[in-house]
Amino acid sequence: MFGRRQFLAGGVVLAAPAIVRAEAFPPGRVTVVVPFPAGAATDISARVYSEQLSALWSQPVVVDNRGGGNGIPAAESVARAKPDGLTIFATSAMTQAVNPALYEKLPYDPIADFEPITRMGTSPFVLLVDAKSPIKTAAELTAALKAHPTKNNFGAGALPARVASELYKLEAGVDAVYVGYKSNPQAIPDVQSGLLNFMMIDTVNAKIAIERGALKGLFVTDTERYSLLPDLPTAAEAGYPNVLLTTWTGYYVPKGTPRPIVDKINADIHRVAAMPEVLARLESMGGTPKLMSPDAFAAFALSEKERWGNIIHRANIKLE
């Protein structure tokens, strides 16, 4: 991928600048670091892409799940990795937009320490209750929570899902205690058992939970109905027009990765995303690619960092 040559100039041995050969990328195994456990929405989509990239590149593309710590250890490890394109960060708004508003100091900078590759997709959240619950609408949930203001709680495994839940609480004027989990799907059984009153989760996992009869959806946090769950009203249709929040996933590499390598990874991801079998798999799970150029993604991520930060400060969300 890189070539170096030495030559003499005035008796001094100098090293010529490295020559990037993007057409030869990758020269070996690629590791895709996911800051979530296996089964999380980001992990699911990363595995779909990694399988096809491996075939395209004729090299192993291995997903490395490094869950825990709200994604901080994983993000830091990628930020410190060699900038050769062989370590890719498949992450979400959590590490790049949410953490900066919740932590006074992070061991990584979401803007300065990474080269954006592309946004992968966006996903609104779904407000969910137990499938067997008599509650049928968000208004009924709000009424039930207001009736017992000291006995309510909700669960979330990822910070974006918690922010979405806190935004609903703020707009609905209800109280509920946050219960943390290692991943969003781990909270589902406790909603079913009644230990949790509600949860908000990404559309990928919400669709799975709804279709297997575990949970019931009340609204989706977007301006339009979700195509794969068309019976769910939008938050505005349900009476909560300000509960609008969409999380996203994206690919990054360490800062300093040569631009030709960045552009090649971006182009190859676009190739994979256009494959009919990939589109079918992603859409069956509730995800549709919404890719960007590296520059467009950089601008998008910067604006999202500000947007999520504003919501977090408005809702006065603090880490315990």
Image: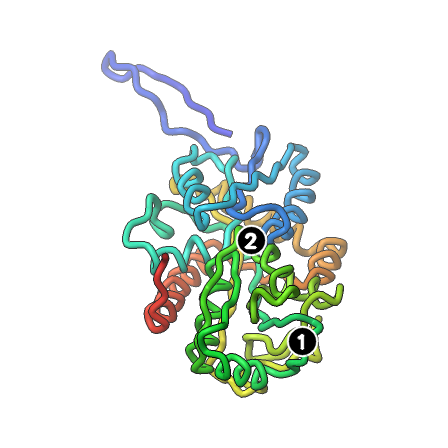
Closer to viewer: mark 2 or mark 1? 1
**In the image, what residue type sits under mark 1?**
Ser
* Residue 89 point in image, percent of width and height: 50, 45
Element type where label 2 sits in the image: loop
Tell me whether circle 2 and circle 1 mark residues in contact (CB < 8 Å).
no
* Residue 284 point in image, percent of width and height: 74, 61
Image side of residue 313 versus residue 223, left or right: left
Asked if 13 appears above or below 221 in the picture, the reply is above
* Dot 1 alpha-carbon crowd within 10 angstroms: few under 14, some 14 to 19, many 20 or more: some
Name which residue lies at 44% across and 63% down: 300
| Residue labelled with disc 2 | 183
Residue closest to the far top: 11
Image side of residue 137 versus residue 111, left or right: right
Name which residue lies at 51% across and 63% down: 161
Q: Quadrant of residue 59?
A: top right
* Residue 82 point in image, percent of width and height: 43, 32
Asked if 68 appears above or below 198 in the picture, the reply is above
Q: Can the viewer see residue 118 in this picture?
A: no
| Numbered-mark total | 2
Asked if 8 appears above or below 274 in the picture, the reply is above
**In the image, what residue type sits under mark 2?**
Ser
* Residue 317 point in image, percent of width and height: 36, 66
Which is more N-terminal, label 1 or label 2?
Answer: 1
Element type where label 1 sits in the image: loop
